[in-house]
Amino acid sequence: MKNKTFICLALIGYVFSHGGAAEAKPSKEYIDIQITPARNLQAEANNELRADAAELADLLNIRPVVEMLRTQQRSGKDMADAPKALQSARLMCLWRMFVASEEVRKVVAQINFDIAVNNVHLETLNNRKRLTNNLINTFNFTQNGVLGIVKNSLAIAAVYPIFRQEIAMTSFGMSGCLPVINMYAPNLIYRKTTDGANMLSHVTDPGFKPEYANQSYLWKYFNSPIPGKGSNEPRREIILKHWEALKGLSANNEKQRDLMDGTNEKTRLEGIKTVSQRIEILHDFKTHIEEFDGALFELHQAVTNVQAGEK
Amino acid sequence: MIARKIKGIFLAFIIMFMQFSVLNKPVSALDRIQLEGQAVSLTPGAKEAANLLGILPKVERLMQLKQLRQGHENLPLTDEELGLKVDVLDKVLGASMEVRMVSGRIDRDLSWAFAGQGALNAKQQKILNSIFTLNFMQIGVLGVLSGPAFLNGRGALGSELLLLASSIGLCLSMLAFAQTNMGYKKPVDGDATILTDVFKIQKPVATDHESKLVIKYLDSVPPGARDGKTRSQVLVDNWKKGKYLRTMSEPNLEKLSAVVPQGKKYKIGAAEFNRRIRMLFDTQYTIELFHEELVELLRAAEIS
């Protein structure tokens, strides 16, 4: 008797827990990350470049020019009156910053496209889920109504007492079973897809290398470690660990990775959970890419906003 | 004779009316060059941008040089023209980067708010679904159990079971009703959003990237505004009108801006997340409109 009770309780518990799959244990260090280097306020007080601006000046290969322009700014003269050579240097800085900024825009536009496409897929899947739930509920109410009418008609006519109870039991039995089906049916809703790789593959696929890799400042930035962090992990790896900690996305699980980034171009099935997780991760990826904008802005400020007379 | 006079007066009226309507037309980018050879003027948007960037005298000088160049467009740029052009370009590009940087920060706040709202909605939906399923199941099980009781001639027991099922059903329905209205809340977390600058709330920690220009833009009156309200005030008024901002109490503004002062604990629900999302989108749109003024400024300062 005790065993039966235990089995019943375990079954009920399973039904209500929705059978959640075990997720990778998150590493707290990576839950909230920033991919720009931490500021060194002491160095800044000594008139050195901010850490993020300095990294970008090196990345864009304009560090000496930036220092030269800062020196000129400190003299207090209007930069518009500076000689032609200095104007050329300013133009070169602006040019490279603009190229880097456009690279960010390009990647963000691609991520936005992926988000839009996946939102459409998610809406389609959610519609199918709602339709399934509504149909099962409607069927449940209908069978209750029909069997109730039959049973009560027999009761009014005072005939078939056993049969009409059997009808009632059937109706109640179905009322009990259909909600369980209703709970699990949405988990069986998938969409077939052959969509190619999305922007997440830039991070999740270790072998991924775009054609423009050698020219792209952004790509170099993502494949370099964060200065001053004391670790050689490139930003790509850090972001991957962040997703692992945040969403339980395992980089070692090839099947899970394929579902996320779509690198495996074979026909595959994906459900609501996969698509909504992908959207969340795409949003997260976008916000980290846009951190580059902040660093670019600081570099620009470092060149233009030097107060006259600063050390 | 009288007819001619009336005709003349009528024509004079028409001419006066046409002049009046032309003068009162809103100034657009296309109208920036005044009629036939007169001084070149900036659009109100370009003028505001130049003022905010502190380069109005330089832009005006560039425009003068542009006028002097008319008919000599093929000559190379002078040192002065080059210096001014690089300066204006530098400032405009810097402003554009600042707008993008702030917009990126808002994207992050939006992503955070959407994730929080999604988690709360999912939790509520999951619990509601569980209550509904439990309700259906208990009615089904007790109903099935009442069947044999009726068949075995124990009608009272059967009725008691059905009564019990109805009572539990009623309780669970009330629970579901309460659940729908109550909703769930989670502690306010994440960095302070841009809304702190719109509401003028003290931030507990300074923002990593200062955005003085964007804040100045938000705190300035848009060109042509008749009511003299700043962009921030317009945003707040619109939110009040749309019932997104029901109270200007400090805790409410702090919750919406994701600011938790020391010693306080705030919780936020799905509805508040929804309001925050709307406000963030509005602010992002307002800030990004600065690009329009920057484009007008670049066009005005262009030397062909």
Image (cartoon, coloured by chain):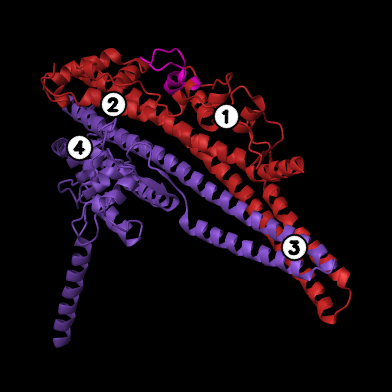
B241 left or right of A78? right
In this view, the mark in front (4 or 1): 1
In this view, the mark in front (3 or 2): 3
Q: Are marks 4 and 1 in contact (CB under 8 Å)?
A: no
The residue beneath circle 3 is B143
Disc 1 versus disc 3: distance between alpha carbons? 45 Å
- Badge 2 sits on which subunit? A
Colour purple maps to chain: B
Q: Are marks 2 and 1 in contact (CB under 8 Å)?
A: no
Q: Along the line of sight, which residue is nearer the eye, A265 or B13? A: A265
Colour red maps to chain: A
Asked if labels 3 and 4 share a chain, the reply is: yes
Disc 4 versus disc 1: distance between alpha carbons? 45 Å
Give the residue displayed 46% in from the left and 50% down from the top: B184
Q: Along the line of sight, which residue is nearer the eye, A91 or B68? A: A91
Q: What label does residue A249 carry, if any?
A: 1
Q: What label does residue B53 carry, if any?
A: 4
